[in-house]
C-alpha cells in the first residue's frame, strides 16, 4: 500500500526543518533526476512541494554527510548492529536497519562492507527515509529524530576510514607488483607471505582474481613452484584467512557507553531557578512541588559520586496533572528518554522472533544510561497478575541497582550489560494497590512515591481554565523553561561536580537518616489475621528493610535539590521533599494515618481513626495494628471499645516545630527562630 502524498510530503518538510538535505527517489531507491548539487545545498520547502506535485508517489531520500549533519550506518538483513550506541534508527524495506549518527565534522567517505553486511553512508551519499515504500518494502522509524538525539559516530567508523585511506595509498604498490618486472624485494618473499598479503588485502569475492595474480607472480620467479605446490600454499592460506575473518565477525562488539555528563546545547535563554519555579507556579500551581522534586532527581547525574538510580513515582487520581508534570521533562534527548509502552522485559530483550544480532537495537537499558526515564503510566505494570507482577518488579529492582542486567534464555543464551548503568526514573501512577506494596516490600522497594494532592476545583475555576490559555500552551511554556534551565545547569557544570560531603550540616544529614528509618518501618511487610475463636490479631514477624539504602538515596536527592537551587551544600530548604517522600512512600492507608496522627499531636483513638480516615472500624483496627507491629506506634487499650495509638519516641521528631518548618507548615515567626544559617559554597549565577 502506497503512502499517501500528504503523509510523505509532511514528513519531507519535517526533515527539511531538521536541516536535512532532502531529495526525491523512486521505488527502485534511485534518485529521480540530478541530485549531486544537493550535497552542497538544501532543497527549499517550495522545491519539495513542487516535486510532490509532479510525482505524488515519490519516495524520500536524505543526503548524508556534512550537508545534513549525519552519517548513517547501513546494516543489511542478517547483519549485526550489536554494540552500536543507541541512536535514531529506522528499519529498511529490505529487512535491515539505518542508524543515524552525528557527522563528526571531518570528511567521512562512503564505505561498502566495512564490516560484514554493513555499509557507511557519509559525505556524497544518501539513504531512503521513512515513510518511503520501495519494491523491497517500507521504511519505518524505530527511534525517530523527534524521540531522541543523534549520538556521536562510533570510533570504529573513523578508524575504518583511516584504514581504507591507507589501503588506497598502498594500491599503487600492488599495481607495481603485478606490472612489468617483479620488484627485487619480491624475489626474496616466500609464496606463503605473498599469498597472505593478497588474501588479506582483497575481499573474498576477489580471491579468484588474486589466485590468478598469484600464479602470474610465481611464473616470474627464477625458480617457480610447481602448480601442485602453488595450489597447496594458496588453499592453506585462504582457509586460514577465511577462519580468521569469521572469528573476527563473530566477536561481540563492545558497546560504547554514553558519557555520564551529557554535552548539552546552550539554552535559548538563561533561566534561573526562581524564574523556572515562577513559570511552573503561574501555569500549574498544584504541580510546582512535584516538578521541583523531579528536577532534583535528574540533576543528580551532575554529582560525580552518585551511583544509585533514583525512581520517583507521582501518585494521584486520574486527571490530577501527573502526566503534565512528566511532560515538562520531555523533548530533552540529552537528559531524558520517554516511553508510552514499557515492560521490564524490554531492558534486555530476548524476543524469540528477533535475530540475536538485532536484539541490541531494541534493548532499552543502554538507551537509558545517564538519562531520566519518563514513564507516563506505571499503573499498567502494577495491574499484572501476581506471578507476572513479581517477575516484573524483580527485574525493575535489579536494574535500579544501577549495575546493568544479565539474562539467560533458551532462545538466545546469556545476554546483558554489566558496569555502571545509572539512570533515573520519573513515572506516574494512580494509587497503588495493597498487593503491589506486598510484592515490592518482599523484593526490596526501589520506588519512591510522592502524592500530587491536587486541589478540588470549584465550578468557577473549572470554567475559567476552559477559556484561559489552553493546557497545551501552558505546558509548552513550562517545557521550554525546564529545558532551558537544565541546559543552563549542564553548561554550568560541563564536567560535573565533586561534592564536599564533609561540608554538609551533619544535623541535616541526621534528619535525612531519621526520615529513612521512618520510611523503612512504614513500608514493612506485615502479614496479619484475626483469630476466628479469640478475635485477637495474629501476625508474623514483619519484614522491614534496613534504612541504609534509603538514607543514601534521600541524601542524593537533597544534594540534587541544593544544586538546582544554586548551592553546593545542603540546607534546610532541601529537606522538605525528603520528609514528604518518607510518608508518601508508604502504603496509602498507613501514610494517611501517619499524617492524621502527627496532625493530632501523636495520639489517636479508634473512633478518631474511623472519622479522620472515613473507614470502617475493622480497617481502622488493622491500620492501627500495622503501625504497632512496625513499631511506629504503641497501642493502649482503653475502657470501652476504643483503643489508642501513640507515636513512639523514636519518631517524635515528626511532631516538632522543626519538622513543621521544614515542611513549610509553621508560621513565619517560628521559621525565623528555628532556621539556622547554613554556609554554602557560592556558585556562578545561571
Image (cartoon, rainbow, N blue to C red):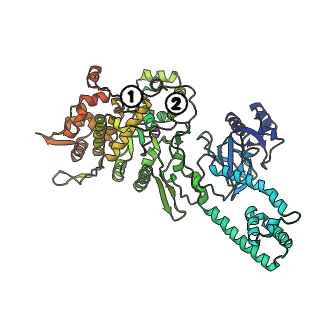
Q: What residue sits 69% from the left and 68% below the top?
A: 242
Q: Which of 64/146 is in front?
A: 64
Q: Describe residue 614's horizontal placement relative to residue 379 as left or right.
A: left
Location of residue 653 in the rendering, given as x and y in whole percent from the top left corner: 23, 34
Q: Describe residue 251's horizontal placement relative to residue 589 as left or right.
A: right
Residue 410: say if magenta: no
Secondary structure, magenta segment, majority class:
loop
Residue extending farthest left: 639
Q: Give, as a single range, the part of the protein colored magenta.
A: 301-306
Question: For residue 334, what is the image quadrant?
Answer: top right
In the rendered view, tell whether residue 615 sits above or below residue 671: below
Q: Which mark is residue 286?
A: none
Q: Which mark is residue 488?
A: 2
Q: Which of 184/585 is in front?
A: 184
Q: SS at mark 2?
A: helix
Which of label 1 and label 2 is nearer to you?
2
Q: Give the labeled residue for mark 1.
A: 455
Amino acid at each position: 500500500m502506497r503512502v499517501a502524498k500528504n503523509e510523505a510530503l509532511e514528513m519531507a518538510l519535517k526533515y527539511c526543518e531538521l536541516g536535512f538535505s532532502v531529495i526525491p527517489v523512486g521505488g527502485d531507491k534511485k534518485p529521480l533526476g540530478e541530485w549531486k548539487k544537493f550535497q552542497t545545498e538544501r532543497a527549499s520547502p517550495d522545491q519539495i512541494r513542487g516535486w510532490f506535485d509532479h510525482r505524488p508517489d515519490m519516495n524520500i531520500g536524505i543526503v548524508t554527510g556534512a550537508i545534513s549533519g549525519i552519517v548513517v550506518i547501513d546494516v543489511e538483513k542478517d547483519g549485526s548492529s550489536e554494540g552500536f550506541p543507541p541512536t535514531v534508527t529506522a528499519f529498511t524495506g529490505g529487512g535491515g536497519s539505518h542508524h543515524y549518527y552525528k557527522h563528526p565534522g571531518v570528511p567521512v567517505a562512503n564505505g561498502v562492507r566495512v564490516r560484514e553486511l554493513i555499509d557507511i553512508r557519509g559525505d556524497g551519499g544518501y539513504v531512503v527515509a521513512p515513510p518511503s515504500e520501495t519494491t523491497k518494502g517500507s521504511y519505518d522509524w524505530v527511534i525517530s529524530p523527534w524521540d531522541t538525539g543523534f549520538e556521536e559516530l562510533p570510533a570504529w567508523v573513523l578508524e575504518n576510514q583511516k584504514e581504507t585511506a591507507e589501503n588506497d595509498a598502498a594500491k599503487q604498490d600492488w599495481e607495481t607488483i603485478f606490472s612489468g618486472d617483479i620488484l627485487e624485494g619480491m624475489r626474496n618473499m616466500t609464496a606463503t607471505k605473498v599469498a597472505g598479503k593478497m588474501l588479506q588485502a582483497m575481499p573474498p569475492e576477489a580471491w579468484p582474481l588474486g589466485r590468478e595474480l598469484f600464479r602470474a607472480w610465481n611464473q616470474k620467479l627464477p625458480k617457480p613452484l610447481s602448480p601442485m605446490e602453488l595450489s597447496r600454499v594458496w588453499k592453506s592460506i585462504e582457509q586460514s584467512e577465511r577462519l580468521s575473518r569469521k572469528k573476527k565477525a563473530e566477536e561481540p562488539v563492545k558497546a560504547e557507553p554514553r558519557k555520564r555528563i551529557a554535552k548539552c546545547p546552550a539554552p535559548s535563554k538563561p533561566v534561573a531557578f526562581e524564574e523556572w519555579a515562577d513559570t511552573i507556579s503561574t501555569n500549574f500551581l498544584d504541580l510546582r512541588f512535584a516538578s521541583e522534586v523531579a528536577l532534583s532527581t535528574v540533576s543528580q547525574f551532575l554529582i560525580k559520586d552518585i551511583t544509585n538510580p533514583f525512581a520517583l513515582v507521582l501518585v494521584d487520581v486520574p486527571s490530577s496533572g501527573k502526566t503534565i508534570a512528566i511532560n515538562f521533562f520531555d523533548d530533552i534527548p540529552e537528559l531524558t528518554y520517554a516511553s508510552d509502552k514499557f515492560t521490564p522485559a524490554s531492558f534486555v530483550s530476548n524476543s524469540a522472533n528477533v535475530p540475536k544480532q538485532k536484539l541490541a537495537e531494541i534493548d532499552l537499558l543502554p538507551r537509558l544510561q545517564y538519562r531520566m526515564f519518563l514513564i507516563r503510566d506505571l499503573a499498567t505494570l502494577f495491574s499484572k497478575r501476581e506471578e507476572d507482577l513479581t517477575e516484573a518488579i524483580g527485574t525493575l529492582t535489579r536494574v535500579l541497582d544501577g549495575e546493568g542486567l544479565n539474562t539467560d534464555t533458551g532462545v538466545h543464551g546469556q545476554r546483558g550489560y554489566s558496569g555502571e548503568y545509572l539512570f533515573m526514573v520519573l513515572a506516574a501512577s494512580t494509587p497503588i494497590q495493597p498487593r503491589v506494596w506486598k510484592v515490592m516490600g518482599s523484593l526490596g522497594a526501589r520506588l519512591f512515591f510522592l502524592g500530587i494532592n491536587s486541589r478540588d476545583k470549584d465550578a468557577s475555576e473549572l470554567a475559567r481554565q476552559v477559556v484561559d490559555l489552553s493546557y497545551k500552551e501552558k505546558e509548552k511554556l513550562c517545557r521550554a523553561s525546564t529545558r532551558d534551565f537544565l541546559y543552563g545547569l549542564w553548561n554550568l557544570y560541563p564536567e560535573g561536580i565533586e561534592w564536599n560531603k564533609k561540608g554538609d550540616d551533619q544535623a541535616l544529614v541526621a534528619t535525612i537518616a531519621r526520615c529513612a528509618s521512618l520510611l523503612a518501618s512504614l513500608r514493612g511487610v506485615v502479614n496479619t489475621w484475626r483469630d476466628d475463636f479469640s478475635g485477637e490479631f495474629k501476625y508474623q514477624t514483619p519484614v522491614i528493610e534496613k534504612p541504609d539504602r534509603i538514607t543514601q538515596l534521600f541524601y542524593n536527592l537533597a544534594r540534587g535539590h541544593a544544586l538546582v537551587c544554586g548551592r553546593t551544600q545542603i540546607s534546610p530548604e532541601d529537606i522538605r521533599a525528603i520528609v514528604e517522600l518518607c510518608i508518601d512512600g508508604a502504603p496509602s492507608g498507613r501514610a494517611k494515618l501517619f499524617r492524621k496522627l502527627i496532625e493530632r499531636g501523636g495520639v489517636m483513638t479508634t473512633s478518631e481513626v474511623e472519622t479522620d480516615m472515613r473507614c470502617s472500624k475493622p480497617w481502622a483496627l488493622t491500620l492501627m495494628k500495622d503501625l504497632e507491629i512496625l513499631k511506629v506506634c504503641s497501642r493502649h487499650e482503653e475502657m470501652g471499645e476504643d483503643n489508642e495509638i501513640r507515636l513512639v519516641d523514636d519518631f517524635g521528631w515528626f511532631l516538632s516545630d522543626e519538622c513543621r518548618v521544614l515542611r513549610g507548615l509553621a508560621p513565619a515567626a517560628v521559621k525565623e527562630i528555628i532556621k539556622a544559617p547554613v554556609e554554602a559554597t557560592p556558585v556562578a549565577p545561571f
